């Protein structure tokens, strides 16, 4: 199994929903053995708003979904 990374450009702010739908489709078509990880890179940032320190998670690359796919043909 030779997994390679691919980048899928998706509608910004809908990355999670698209990832969920893609995972459901992969499972329903029985292709789980061809897919590795599906990743939306995020990071935790600290903000000061109204004098209060808050942590929030933000997307590193908004509008992109990273997929690990097996490219070897049987």
Image (cartoon, rainbow, N blue to C red):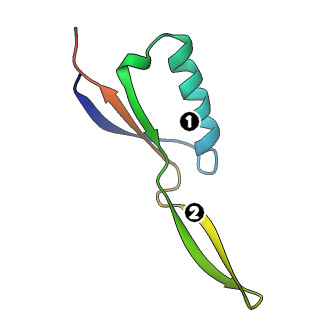
Residue at 22% from the left image edge and 13% from the top image edge = 73
- Between 51 and 66, the one nearer to me in the picture: 51
Name which quarter of the figure residue 20 lies in.
Answer: top right
Residue 26 position (above or below residue 57): above
Residue 73 position (above or below residue 35): above
| Helix, strand or loop for disc 1 | helix
Residue at 53% from the left image edge and 17% from the top image edge = 27
Q: Quadrant of the C terminus?
A: top left
Label 1 crowd (10 A; few <14 / some 14-19 / many >=20):
some
* Residue 44, numbered circle: none
Q: Position of residue 67 (x, y in %)?
A: 40, 36
Q: Quadrant of the N terminus?
A: top left
Among the two numbered marks 2 and 1 on one chain, the one whose residue lies closer to the N terminus: 1
Task: List the residue tagged with mark 1.
Answer: 19
Q: Position of residue 11 (x, y in %)?
A: 58, 44
| Helix, strand or loop for disc 2 | strand
Q: Are marks 2 and 1 in contact (CB under 8 Å)?
A: no
Q: Position of residue 21 (x, y in %)?
A: 61, 28
Residue at 61% from the left image edge and 42% from the top image edge = 16
Name which quarter of the figure residue 6 lies in.
Answer: top left
**Total of numbered circles in the picture?**
2
> How far apart in space, not on screen, are marks 2 and 1 (Cα)?
16 Å
Q: Residue furthest bottom?
A: 51
Name which quarter of the figure residue 44 lies in.
Answer: bottom right
Report whether 32 appears left or right of 71: right
Label 2 crowd (10 A; few <14 / some 14-19 / many >=20):
few
* Residue 58, numbered circle: 2
Q: Position of residue 37 (x, y in %)?
A: 41, 35
């Amino acid at each position: 199994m030779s997994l390679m990374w691919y980048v899928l450009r998706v509608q910004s702010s809908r990355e999670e929903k698209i990832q969920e739908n893609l995972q459901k489709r992969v499972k329903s078509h029985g292709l789980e053995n061809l897919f590795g990880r599906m990743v939306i890179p995020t990071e935790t940032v600290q903000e000061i708003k109204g004098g209060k320190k808050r942590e929030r998670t933000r997307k590193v690359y908004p509008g992109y979904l990273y997929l690990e796919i097996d490219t070897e043909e049987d």
